[in-house]
Amino acid sequence: MKILWAPWRVTFITEKKDVCIFCDNPKRNDDSLIFERRTHVFAMLNKYPYNSGHTMIAPYRHVINIEDLTNEEWMELFQLMKDCLKAIRKIMSPDGFNIGFNIGKSSGAGYEHIHLHIVPRWIGDTNFMPVLSDTKVIPEHLEATYRKLVNELKNLKS
């Protein structure tokens, strides 16, 4: 059995969640790590990433189950996923991706608001740091990744 060590995420796990970030963040004046807004969905960086570029895509509407998404939300979510994959490939050159939904608390969902995770992966991106020192190395600051994604998605549209 392989074990995924992610001790740096304990802050997220223990953080009090008074509001749904997927409902609240899009309403804020600052972009709250939201780097792309579409009609029905938006993309934001994960504040507690598994890896650099860890992206989440969610509808603005509070939806808990995939089957409750409208066709418009579903189509736009997957189009934005494709655009994010293109942008992340260009600016970060990952070797692969983990992509998926966590639905329900038992699956590890921190918020019961449907959202898609895109986690860029590199060969050898797991190392001794999390195991020996409870430390995860995220090599790029969130703000730098944010700026790159905003610019690359603009380039994709032009």
Image (cartoon, rainbow, N blue to C red):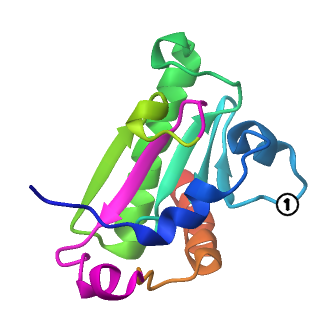
Query: Hey, which residue is sitting farthest right in the picture?
Result: 29
Q: Indicate whether 102 appears above or below 92.
A: above
State how many labels appear: 1
Please tell me which residue is depicted at 23% across the width and 82% down the height of the picture.
127
Q: Position of residue 26 (x, y in %)?
A: 78, 44
* 142 left or right of 53 in image: right
Q: Nearer the viewer, residue 149 or 136?
A: 136
Element on which disc 1 rests: loop
Q: Quadrant where the N terminus lies? A: bottom left
Between residue 16 and residue 80, name the one nearer to us.
Answer: 16
Above-or-below relation of 64 to 86: above
Task: Determine whether, in the image, residue 118 is placed left or right of residue 33.
Answer: left
Q: Quadrant of residue 108?
A: top left
Closer-to-camera residue (125/71): 125
Q: Mark 1 points at which residue?
A: 30
Q: Locate residue 2, reporting x and y percent.
A: 13, 59
Q: Is residue 118 magenta?
A: yes
Q: Give the range drawn in magenta.
A: 111-135
Q: Say whether residue 51 is visible.
A: no
Q: What residue is drawn where x is 43% and y is 70%?
A: 7
Say if residue 42 shows up in the picture. Answer: yes
Q: Which amino acid does label 1 sit on?
A: Asp
Q: In this view, does 76 lie above or below 57?
A: above
Left or right of 14 on screen, residue 139: left
Q: Nearer the viewer, residue 99 or 147?
A: 99
Residue drawn at (63%, 73%), measured in percent from left and top?
147
Looking at the rendered image, the quarter that the C terminus falls into is bottom right
Please tell me whether residue 97 belongs to the stretch shown in magenta. Answer: no
Residue 71: percent from the left, percent from the top?
52, 13
